[in-house]
Image (cartoon, rainbow, N blue to C red):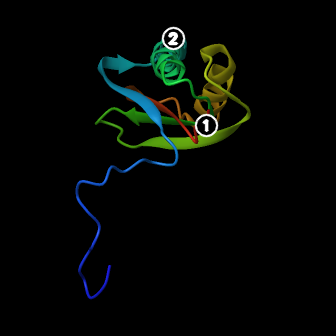
Amino acid sequence: MFNGIDYNRISDVYIPSSLSFGKSQILSRHYTNRKEVELLLFKLLDDVCFGLRMHQVVAKIVHLSIGYSKQTGGGFSRQKRMGQDSNLSQDIFPYSLTILHTFDSGMLIRSIGISLSNTSI
């Protein structure tokens, strides 16, 4: 860019250095039972890991977002680097549980999201 003019060609294809894969869901009701939340989390994670395997990549970082109900407001969004790169749900799930159990305040949960990033072949 020179003097505010960008000389890049629009037709040039952008290839990101790293992909991220994620899925989130606004829940149909408030969830108080954390075992139900863990089951929902595993289902979302399983879908995300399927995408990783379809693209033949593994991820280094797991990111969890939890949104609480409107009555209480707030939530949290945290990430954790995994000890070993993976695209398998059973390898990644314990890291997502660690985040959930560490930062969850026990309020009514209304949304949940998980993403995996810092991918490599």
Give the answer, above or below, for where 108 lies relative to 8.
above
The residue at the far bottom in this view is 3
The residue under the point 43% across, 31% down is 22
The residue under the point 34% across, 20% down is 30
The residue indicated by pointer 1 is 120
Q: Give whichever of 112, 110 is nearer the camera.
A: 112
The residue under the point 60% across, 16% down is 89
The x, y position of residue 42, in whole percent, is 53, 15
> Element under label 2?
helix
Q: Give whichever of 55, 88 is nearer the camera.
A: 55
The residue under the point 52% across, 44% down is 18
Whether tag 1 and tag 2 are in contact, CB under 8 A, the answer is no
Give the answer, above or below, for where 32 lies relative to 58.
above
Q: Is residue 2 left or right of residue 76?
A: left
Which circle's residue, 1 or 2, is located before the other in the chain?
A: 2
The x, y position of residue 91, in whole percent, is 69, 19
The x, y position of residue 78, in whole percent, is 55, 43
The residue at the far right in this view is 83
Amino acid type at circle 1 is Ser
**What's the distance in space between the residues labelled 1 and 2, CA to CA?**
27 Å
Q: From the image, which quarter does the C terminus lie in?
A: top right
Q: Is residue 83 left or right of residue 34?
A: right
Q: Which quadrant would residue 5 be assigned to in this image?
A: bottom left
Q: Which quadrant would residue 68 be assigned to in this image?
A: top left
> Element under label 1?
loop
Amino acid type at circle 2 is Leu
Q: Give whichever of 77, 16 is nearer the camera.
A: 16
Count of numbered circles in the view:
2
The residue indicated by pointer 2 is 39
Q: Give whichever of 45, 14 is nearer the camera.
A: 14
Disc 2: CA contacts within 10 A as few (<14), some (14-19) or many (>=20): few
